[in-house]
Image: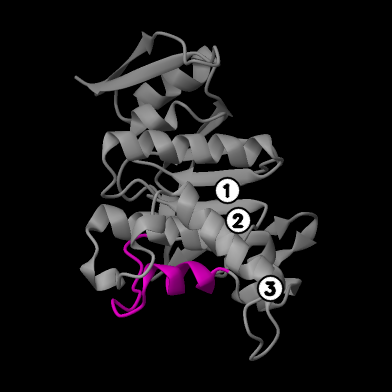
């Protein structure tokens, strides 16, 4: 996949394959092309060369509802009316499953409630978005993506405004999604959290610097290198399920 803006290459021959049942974290320095890549994967930008295929089909060949039932999107600083309640926003995730002018079904309401409960946003379901804090708003927007029940989640900086306990809750939700056979691709600036993913895609200057499993030493060395060795990676005690853990610290 290649994409140019103003005669300059923003993505340079990026090739990527993400299987179901895996969580891929995308990291790299500012301006590396991370968000642009995710927008291309979501079909929000059209590359000059290459294409995105999802579940074996070209994304461009799918209708809007078909695409939304396969891929759920959460972008950076999304503009959503502050007058909509948290419930209204979660229900937006059900639109791809509804017919034209159809009223929400019991399944729609169940999916929206489940998503709001999973993100800890059920308690303020009746409050307008404009009355919520940044972290609360982010959890409602995540609920909208989860309510879609799409197998593929594309999340651009999903941890913005979330405190550490809610970041841990988010990670548990992602783990549950991939354990159920879904796929997650998330752009993360929180490198410690990125190191909890299954695989790590490191980008630099619009290209792939390295891509591999987090548990491989080469991947963690590449993470240090892509940031010009200005971070150090240290092992942590294993997680409750026995998975290795690491911390990334600026040096």
Queried whether the magenta region covers residue 219, the answer comes back as no
Queried whether the magenta region covers residue 85, the answer comes back as yes
Q: Can residue 11 be seen here?
A: no
**Nearer to us in this view, 199 or 160:** 160
Q: Is residue 21 left or right of residue 212?
A: right
Q: Residue furthest right?
A: 56
Which residue is painted at 39% across and 33% down in the image? 168
Magenta residues, as a range? 76-93
What x and y, as percent, mark residue 25?
Answer: 49, 38
Q: How is the image coloured?
A: one colour
What x and y, as percent, mark residue 157?
Answer: 37, 49
**Nearer to us in this view, 116 or 7:** 116
Q: Which residue is mark 2?
A: 1
- Between marks 1 and 2, how big is the CA–CA gap? 5 Å
Q: Which residue is mark 1?
A: 14
Q: Is residue 248 left or right of residue 202?
A: left
Contact check, label 1 and label 2, Cβ < 8 Å: yes
Q: Which of the two discs, 1 and 2, labels the residue nearer the N terminus?
A: 2
Determine which quarter of the picture holds residue 70: bottom right
- Between marks 2 and 3, how big is the CA–CA gap? 30 Å
- Specify few, some or many for label 1: CA neighbours under 10 Å numbering under 14, 14-19, or 20 or more: some
What x and y, as percent, mark residue 129?
Answer: 30, 70
């Amino acid at each position: 996949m290649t994409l140019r803006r103003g005669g300059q290459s923003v993505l340079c021959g990026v090739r990527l394959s993400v299987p179901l049942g895996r969580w891929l974290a995308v990291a790299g320095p500012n301006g590396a092309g991370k968000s642009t890549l995710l927008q291309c994967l979501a079909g929000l930008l059209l590359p000059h060369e290459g294409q995105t295929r999802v579940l074996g089909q070209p994304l461009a060949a799918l209708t809007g509802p078909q695409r939304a039932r396969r891929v759920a999107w959460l972008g950076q600083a999304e503009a959503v009316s502050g007058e909509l309640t948290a419930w209204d926003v979660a229900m937006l995730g059900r639109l791809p499953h509804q017919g034209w002018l159809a009223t929400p079904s019991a399944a729609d309401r169940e999916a929206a409630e489940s998503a709001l409960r999973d993100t800890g946003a059920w308690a303020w379901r009746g409050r307008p978005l404009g009355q919520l804090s940044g972290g609360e708003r982010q959890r409602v927007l995540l609920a909208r993506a989860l309510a879609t029940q799409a197998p593929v989640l594309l999340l651009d900086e999903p941890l913005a405004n979330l405190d550490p306990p809610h970041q841990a809750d988010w990670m548990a939700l992602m783990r549950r999604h991939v354990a159920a056979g879904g796929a997650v691709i998330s752009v993360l600036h929180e490198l410690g959290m990125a190191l909890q993913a299954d695989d790590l895609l490191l980008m630099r200057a619009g290209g792939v610097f390295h891509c591999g499993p987090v548990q491989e030493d080469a991947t963690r060395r590449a993470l240090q290198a892509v940031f010009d060795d200005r971070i150090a990676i240290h092992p942590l005690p294993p997680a409750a399920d026995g998975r290795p853990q690491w911390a990334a610290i600026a040096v």
